[in-house]
Image (spheres, rainbow, N blue to C red):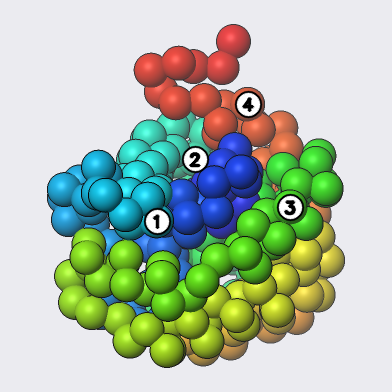
């Protein structure tokens, strides 16, 4: 799952929302840092409400991802998108197609959910803006594999709120720009403008399987 799918049901709990986003945030802030469920578990009943909420959010993130990635819809869309991207890109022998296939399922599901409830995205960002970045960082340092610098994290959180990149997913050109930012961050070659030709069909495929994507395997869509 991506940011909005993870967080949309927790907008009234900003520090829980921060915890839900934290594993993905840390991939950007410092890819060597991980927020693990096993490290968060001892903190879920912490006397500090912010620490407890962040810990519960981290655990929710991993629980959501565990079932989401096991759904048949995710597996099949991931494969279909990987093949479409591989066919659309020049051969490079790398893992760009599979990496992109995975994240595009999640990104386009976010966009679909945002389109359905656009007011919730503004509420999402308002909740994020209410956070104290230093408090979030201090909480994460109780449950991360290595410390994150509090000032750096606070700066990142401010930028996350300013950029509001989740709004860009609805526009193919802006989506490509955001994907290329990810490509630079993970040291993969840039994507050509022609890749946007794939996006309309991918959006339709995600919409067709919305209910399956949002149904845990133990509770299949009916």
Q: Residue 50 carries which label?
A: 1
Q: How crowded is mark 1: few (under 14 residues within 10 Å), some or many (20 or more)?
A: many
Residue beneath disc 3: 123
Q: Residue at the front extreme?
A: 47
Rounded to the nearest angstrom, the CA distance separating label 2 from label 3 is 27 Å
Q: Is mark 3 on a helix, strand or loop?
A: helix
Could you tell me which residue is drawn at 25 percent across and 42 percent down?
45
Q: Is mark 1 on a helix, strand or loop?
A: helix
Q: Position of residue 104 (x, y in %)?
A: 59, 58
Choose between 38 and 219: the one closer to the eye.
Answer: 38
Say whether residue 9 is left or right of residue 207. left
Q: How crowded is mark 3: few (under 14 residues within 10 Å), some or many (20 or more)?
A: some
Tell me which label, 4 or 3, sits earlier in the chain.
3
Tell me which label, 4 or 2, sits earlier in the chain.
2
Is residue 168 shown to the viewer in this render? yes
Rounded to the nearest angstrom, the CA distance separating label 4 from label 2 is 11 Å
Say whether residue 26 is left or right of residue 162. left
Choose between 97 and 32: the one closer to the eye.
Answer: 32
Residue beneath disc 2: 74
Q: Residue 64 sits in which quadrant?
A: top left
Choose between 147 and 209: the one closer to the eye.
Answer: 147
Say whether residue 142 is left or right of residue 8. left
- The nearer-to-camera label among 4 and 1 is 1
């Amino acid at each position: 799952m991506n940011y909005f799918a993870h967080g949309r049901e927790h907008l009234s709990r900003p520090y829980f929302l921060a915890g839900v986003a934290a594993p993905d945030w840390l991939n950007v802030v410092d890819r060597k840092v991980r927020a693990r469920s096993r490290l968060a578990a001892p903190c879920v009943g912490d006397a500090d409400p912010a620490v407890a909420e962040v810990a519960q959010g981290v655990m929710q993130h991993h629980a959501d991802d565990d079932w989401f990635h096991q759904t048949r819809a995710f597996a099949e869309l991931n494969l279909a998108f990987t093949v479409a991207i591989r066919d659309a890109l020049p051969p490079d022998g790398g893992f760009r197609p599979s990496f992109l296939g995975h994240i595009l399922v999640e990104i386009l599901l976010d966009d679909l959910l945002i389109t359905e409830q656009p007011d919730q995205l503004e509420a999402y960002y308002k909740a994020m803006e209410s956070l104290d970045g230093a408090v979030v960082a201090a909480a994460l340092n109780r449950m991360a594999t290595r410390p994150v610098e509090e000032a750096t994290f606070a700066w990142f959180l401010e930028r996350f709120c300013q950029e509001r990149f989740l709004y860009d997913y609805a526009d193919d050109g802006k989506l490509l720009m955001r994907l290329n930012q990810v490509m630079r961050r993970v040291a993969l070659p840039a994507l050509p403008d022609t890749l946007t030709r794939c996006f309309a069909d991918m959006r339709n495929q995600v919409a067709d399987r919305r209910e399956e994507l949002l149904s845990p395997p133990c509770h299949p869509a009916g």
